[in-house]
Image (cartoon, rainbow, N blue to C red):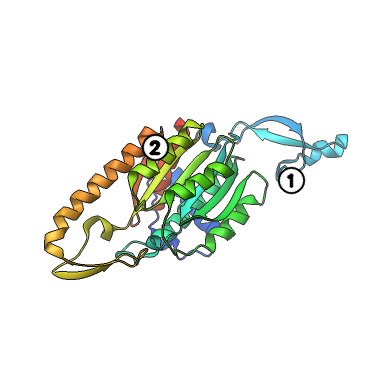
Amino acid sequence: MSVPQRLVPPSTLAQLANLELVARTVVEGALTGLHRSPRFGFSQEFAEYRPYVPGDDLRFIDWNVFARSDRMYVKRFFGDTNTRVVVLVDVSASMGIDPARGAIRKIDFARYLAAAVVYLAARQHDAVGLAAFADDVRVYRPPSARGRSAEGIYHLLEGLEPAGETDWPRVLDHVSRQVTKRSLLVMISDFFCEPEPLASRLRGLGARGHDLLLLHLLDPNEERLPVAGSATLRDVETGAVMTVAGDEVAGGYRLRLAEHLRALEHATGSAGGHYRLMNTDRPLDRALVEYLRFRERHP
């Protein structure tokens, strides 16, 4: 697959009217230059009819057949993947820090990226759900393929605001109880956590047959720690305060960050999952391509 040529900066997306329009714009940008694939549901070629059952999307009823036979049938397409997708969005306080120049808040990047994944899932007629969390799951919508399910998730995403600490073991234990059928779990977070407790829960989810995709968001300032001279740092989740000499800690910080990223990638891999690091000043359609590549390998 080639890299999209029409890329939309996150700051431009923030000016769009609503989340569904953001999602559509990101998806169209990601598809530019990609080969269309029925695995992704982009080739909507008719496949067959099946009888209508309550809860089916009314948009896919063939009303011409109904007029002739007085029976309702739903059209199916080769692009349908029938996957269950649950998008997990971190809404802890660290997701709301002021962004670097040219970037947007991590919570907004997560909101837009989640909306794009939901848009794609709905386009493929997948059942899609949402879990927003910090110290526990605060919002949960179970996976559904009904016609207006995506609209409901967009509404929930628009209302998310960051607060509190993250408790990954508690959150994933909760998700494990709620999501009992095999699903694709897309986790969007800044992953400020100890890797090993996270890894143990990921391994449990992987052992139950879930496909795992971790999308790790970092603000550019979190990568380079632009601190010069003496500075006071405050943990936005715990309130802990530390005074540091910027020149002295910068090198050590970058080493610790690199170790943390490697540990997260290893934790994900040990559970059979897939890990991707994403900067919040980069175009979202490029981030979505990573999701599409994952879906190509995990239809």
Give percent across and percent down for residue 96: 40, 64
> Taking 66 as reference, is 85 left or right?
left
Give percent across and percent down for residue 129: 58, 47
Q: Which of the two residues, 98 or 46, is positioned nearer the viewer here?
A: 98
At label 2, which amino acid type do we have? His
Which residue carries the number 1 mark?
A: 58
Q: Does 148 sit above or below residue 233?
A: above
For image coordinates 32% across by 63% down, the residue present is 102
Which residue carries the number 2 mark?
A: 274
Quadrant position of the N terminus in the picture: top left
Sequence order check: which comes first, mark 2 or mark 1? 1
Can you tell which quarter of the image residue 139 is in? bottom right
Disc 1 crowd rating (10 Å Cα; few below 14, some 14-19, many 20+) is some
> Taking 106 as reference, is 118 left or right?
right
Asked which secondary structure carries label 1, the reply is helix
Disc 2 to disc 1, C-alpha distance: 35 Å
Q: Which of the two residues, 221 or 170, is positioned nearer the viewer here?
A: 170
Can you tell which quarter of the image residue 196 is in? top left
For image coordinates 38% across by 44% down, the residue present is 197
